[in-house]
Image (cartoon, rainbow, N blue to C red):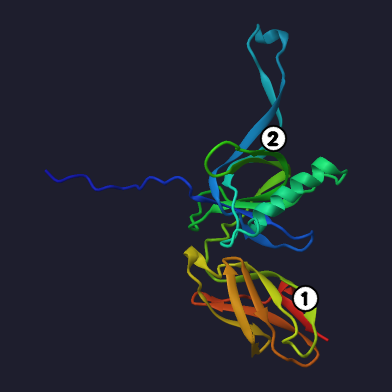
Amino acid sequence: MATTPTTRVTELARSSRLDIDTATYPTVVYQQLMGVEEAKLLEELRTEDDEVYDDTGAMREEVTGYAWRIEAKIAWSTNLAGTAIDAVQAFLRSQFKALRTSAAGNAEFGIRWYHRDGLDDGNSHEGRVYVKSWAPSGGKGRETIDIVLQGQGQITDITNPAGSLTPTVTSIAPTSGSTAGSDQVVGIYGQHYMPNGVAAVTAVEFGTDDAIDYTVVSDSHIVAIPPAVAASTVQVRVTTTAGASTDTAADDYTYA
C-alpha cells in the first residue's frame, strides 16, 4: 500500500524579523534588530462590561478598541572588538533612558514585523512604539535584556518587505556634498543588500557614475564614497544580483 505524500510543512520558530526605524521622523532608516532570542507580537482587544438585566447574570462585553505590543528577549551584544554596543540595541536603550530621565514625550519610533523569508503569512505589520520596559537579566552567563515595545496608535498591515529581493533605497545621509565627491562618506539605507547574510551588491551609482568605493555593512546599510560630479541632483542607485533599486525622492543626492 502506497504511503500518503506530505502536503504541508510545519513553520519553524524564529521565522519573524523585527526592524527598528532609527532615524528622526520623517526620515526612515530601518535596521534589523540583531540578537533576538525570543519575540512575540501581542494584539489584544479592549472591552468594556456591557451586561444588562436581561442577560440574567451572564457576562457580556463590548469591544471598544485594541492594543498591541512586542515582547522580546535580546542577547546584549557588542561589535567584534567589544568596544561598542550593537548600534540598534544602543538606540533602544537610549530611547528608554530618554523617557526615564527627562520629559521627552513618548520617544516614539517605527517598527516593522514580518516573515524573514518573504512568506506572505498575513502577519506583516508596521507601526510606532516606545520602549516601555527594559529589564537586564543579571546573574551568571551572557547578559540578556527583556524589553517591551508598546504600540502607539494603529498597527498597519503591509506587504512583506522581504517578499522581493530587489534592493531598495529608503534614505541616504547626508543628502548632499561637494562636487569633489571623494571628501564625503555617504550612508545608504534600505533593504536586500545582504540577503541571507550574503553580500549581493554588484554596483553603487551616483547618477551615471560608479561610487569610488563602497562597503556593504548589513542587509540594510551601505557606506559609499561618491564620485566627482558637476553640480546637480542625482539618483543613488544600488544594483544587486536581483536587480536595481527604483528611483524615488528618498535616494536623491545633491552635488553643490
Q: Quadrant of residue 88?
A: bottom right
The residue depicted at 58 percent of the width and 46 percent of the height is 74
Please tell me the numbered disc located at residue 157: none
The residue depicted at 86 percent of the width and 44 percent of the height is 102
Say which residue label 1 marks: 175
Q: Secondary structure at mark 2?
A: strand
Q: Mark 1, mark 2: which one is toward the viewer?
A: 1
In the rendered image of this protein, does residue 169 appear above or below residue 234?
A: above
3D distance between C-alphas at marks 1 and 2: 39 Å
Left or right for 38, reference 209: left
Q: Secondary structure at mark 1?
A: loop
The residue depicted at 74 percent of the width and 78 percent of the height is 252
Q: Residues within 10 Å of mark 2 (few under 14, many from 20)?
A: few
Say which residue label 2 marks: 66
Left or right for 153, reference 144: right
The amino acid pointed to by label 2 is Tyr
Q: Quadrant of residue 131?
A: top right
